[in-house]
Amino acid sequence: MTQAEQRPLPVPQPESDFYWEKCREHELWLRRCNDCQRAYFYPRDICPHCFSRNVTWVKASGRGTLFTYAIVHRPPTPAFRDRVPYVVAIVELEEGPKMPTNLVGIEPDPAKIRVGMPVVVDFEDVSPTISLPVFRPANSA
Amino acid sequence: MSRPLQNQRIAIVGVDESDEIGIVPNKSPLQLHAEAAYNALADAGLSIKDVDGLLTAGPFSTLVVAEYLGIEPRFTDSTSVGGSSFVIHLAHAVAAIRQGYCRVALITHGESGRSARTRPPLFQGLPDSQYEVPYGIIGAPIRYSLACMRYMHQYGEERTRQAMAEIAVATRKWAQLNPKALMRDPLTFEDYHNSRWISYPFHLYDCCLVTDAGGAVVVTTEEVARSCRKRPVWILGAAEGHDHNMISAMPDLTRTIAYRTGPAALEQAGVTHEDIDLAMIYDSFTYTVLVTLESLGFCGPGEGPDFVANQRTAPGGDFPMNTNGGGLSYTHSGMYGVFLILEAVRQLRGECGERQVMHKKDSSQPAKIALVHGTGGSLSSCGTAILARD
Ligand SMILES: [Zn+2]
């Protein structure tokens, strides 16, 4: 595989090390603000809702609903050539924030996928250090 | 006696593309910048020596472009917030000229979206490199299609689909009247619906072209404008804004920050939606147009499909839009915004021949007031400008 064909992996940054460490343990953690009480995505040390620095980490339930999705047919880079068609999505977590992800465990078929459907987090181990949080239909095993 | 600078009206006095646009593998992006600059200055009847302000966007900052052109500007602006940047540059040029930072501002664009020999590498420090890219959420078609699906969910899939087809077909009809457009074959509704999926819900014909092109705009004072070759096109109002970067961080996937820039620009210009003879609306995708028309306030949320129904935006329709053939059928180098300005200026000058749009209130005269709206990033940034002839 050439460099261009390798799947792009996240490079954790100082404020997201904890997030990715927890993902590796197959847990989804969110930042939450102690002042405005809102959870948010993506993780950063200052609350994007009220600019407070009084923020903490909370473990997410892993439950949410499908906010929107798309089915990718034309691979955006060579790395995704063997993956099409695949489903990209934005999931609205039970705690409030929305996060980008893949919808897995369901056929990439608009007749089967429904915006608003309940989904649960799962983890895809893509490297020894990185596990990506993905989501599957809540009722699937 | 001329008016004090701060009260002067600011005008666009020159516009043009690079010598060739479309598929131009034999020219570099900087060459396209330079050709467009040369041609736009000739259009204005000004010399490169008159230029003391430079504005550009993209991987080449004003440092690079100024050196290439051989100029030493005293006002520079490399604001680069996606394809809307050049419309936003109009606002910045007006402010700079009124404050005396420069007298003749040159806005340039050049991009080899199709034929570039090198591409900028992915910068891994960006949040989207961590949170979107690993999932294959890469590039505009995938990102915009996520927003479109949410719109379909809220406002009805079938009527949204029909609206997207209406926009694609109407825009192609305009392109057929523009000799510079890349795609000039007829496009039927059937062609649209039968075209392959790029990123569902986007068909091929929901997506803009990928071309090579340069474009440039010359902006100056009322005083200088009076001595230019062609009649001035006034910048009556201009506003900018952005409300997110990543598509997953967009506050509302069915509304862009145009909801703020549109009314702000109209108010500044002292005109209303009903006064607009021509709308040049950034069409990276059919959905971009739909969500923008609503956000600008031409119609309410979810009413876009009714607004564009029955080829209303096509030649002969009562809402002429994207009369150059748009990013969908004329050209789309990547950051398309500058070309919206080119077409609006040409329409207001009455230079558009077969596709000339006339003034609503006097059909013997060319269009008088145009709204130009750029959208950049992942529906992230917007710039609206209201342009008018005397
Ligand atoms: Zn807060």
Image: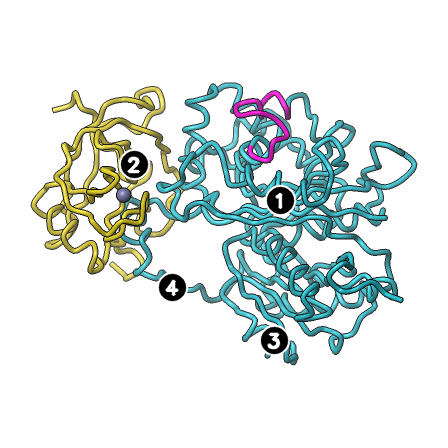
Chain colours: A yellow, B cyan
Query: How far across and down, in percent of the image, does residue B133 sit?
Result: 31, 49
Query: How far across and down, in percent of the image, does residue B274 sit?
Result: 74, 30
Circle 1 chain: B
Vertical comparison of A49 with B306: above or below: below
Vertical comparison of B273 with A42: above or below: above
SS state under label 1: strand
> Label 1: which residue?
B373
Image quadrant for the N terminus of chain B? Answer: bottom right
**Distance Cα–Cα, label 2 vs label 4:** 28 Å
Q: Are marks 3 and 4 on the same chain?
A: yes
> Label 3: which residue?
B66
First reached walking from the N terminus: tag 3 or tag 4 = 3
Disc 2 marks a residue whose amino acid type is Lys
Residue B29 counted in the magenta span: no
Part of the protein shown in magenta: B295-308
**Distance Cα–Cα, label 2 vs label 1:** 28 Å
Q: Are marks 1 and 4 in contact (CB under 8 Å)?
A: no
Q: Mark 4 packing: few (<14 Cα in 10 Å), some, or many (20+)? A: few
Depth check: B322 or B388 in front?
B388
Which residue sits at x=54%, y=37%? B288
SS state under label 2: strand
> Label 4: which residue?
B121
Disc 4 marks a residue whose amino acid type is Pro
SS state under label 4: loop
Q: Quadrant of residue B2?
A: bottom right
> Label 2: which residue?
A98
Which residue sits at x=86%, y=59%? B230
